[in-house]
Amino acid sequence: MNTLKCLAAGTALLCVSSGAFAAHHEGPGNKAVAEAWFEASCGDLAGFTAYVDAHMADDGVFMPARYVGLGFTVENDEGDGFGTIMAVTAGTPAASVLKAGDQFVSVNGMPSTYQNRDKTTFRGQPGESVNAVVMRDGKEMSVDVNRGIIASKNVKSTVLKNLGIANADDWGTAECSVVEVVAEGDVVYLTTDYSDTETETGYPFTQRQVTRMKFNDHGKVTEATILGEDRFVLEQLGYSISR
């Protein structure tokens, strides 16, 4: 859903024994960077991209919330572009079968149209097979992929690449607020709230999210891990989970 871009934005993030250094390391700098990271994610796309580039360590990693699926990002705007794969996550079930640019023709027999976007079955139980037909280089081909548990671990270059293909026009529409910022050594825990509206239906939704950010001794983000309320969001938008 393109309404979750700000949540996806969190896309993007050595213990010490010296008392003096530890005091410097867990001082206001890291907390300020973490809070500003969040605020930038709720602003314009270019500003957030620049902030991530400046404050994420070159060897830093971002770990979004886990989910069951195939492991790709798909364009879901109305029109001919619906169902086109924008990016495939390395090391996921989709990585060995699908590629960026593939366009879904059908998924488990359901035509892949904008009107059917809520009926496709990419999500489901791990290990279950998803049968699809995709268009690649002007030719239709059948693919069969088993769902898996997707636990992405994106390096900085991947985070910046993903931000580079995001839609700037759909960015920064959420109302965002910081609930709490807590620092423990080189780790900062950031609790935040989001409120937004699903573009297609006009349904409002809210979500609370916890981001754990770890910093190196230069004040750069080396790890960022997100825990959110994806199921709660889907329920607010009228979706249900069934077997």
Image (cartoon, rainbow, N blue to C red):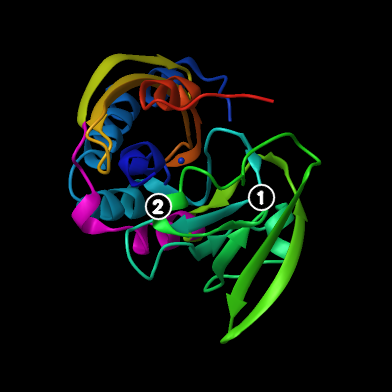
**Label 1 or label 2, whichever comes before in sequence order:** 1
Q: Is residue 62 above or below residue 81?
A: above
Q: Nearer the viewer, residue 2 or 40?
A: 2
Measuring 29% from the left and 24% from the top, which residue is drawn there?
205
Residue corresponding to mark 2: 115
Amino acid type, label 1: Leu
Q: Nearer the viewer, mark 1 or mark 2?
A: 2
10 drawn magenta:
no
Lateral position of residue 138 relative to residue 94, left or right: left
- Tell me the tag on residue 104: none
Residue 218 image offset from top left, x and y in percent:
41, 41
Can the viewer see residue 91? Answer: no
Residue 45 image offset from top left, x and y in percent:
24, 53
- Would you call the spot at circle 1 few (<14 residues within 10 Å), some (14-19), or many (20 or more)? many
Residue 186 image offset from top left, x and y in percent:
48, 25
Q: Pick the quarter of the image with the C terminus.
A: top right
Q: Pick the quarter of the image with the N terminus.
A: top left
Residue 196 image offset from top left, x and y in percent:
24, 31
Lateral position of residue 189 relative to residue 40, left or right: right
Q: Is residue 40 above or below residue 211?
A: below
Q: Nearer the viewer, residue 97 or 200?
A: 200
- Tell me the tag on residue 70: 1
Furthest-bottom residue in this view:
138
Amino acid type, label 2: Gln
- Would you call the spot at circle 2 few (<14 residues within 10 Å), some (14-19), or many (20 or more)? few
Q: Which residues are magenta?
A: 158-174
Q: Is residue 2 above or below residue 30?
A: below
Measuring 37% from the left and 71% from the top, which residue is drawn there?
80
Provide the secondary structure element on which disc 2 rests: helix
Provide the secondary structure element on which disc 1 rests: loop
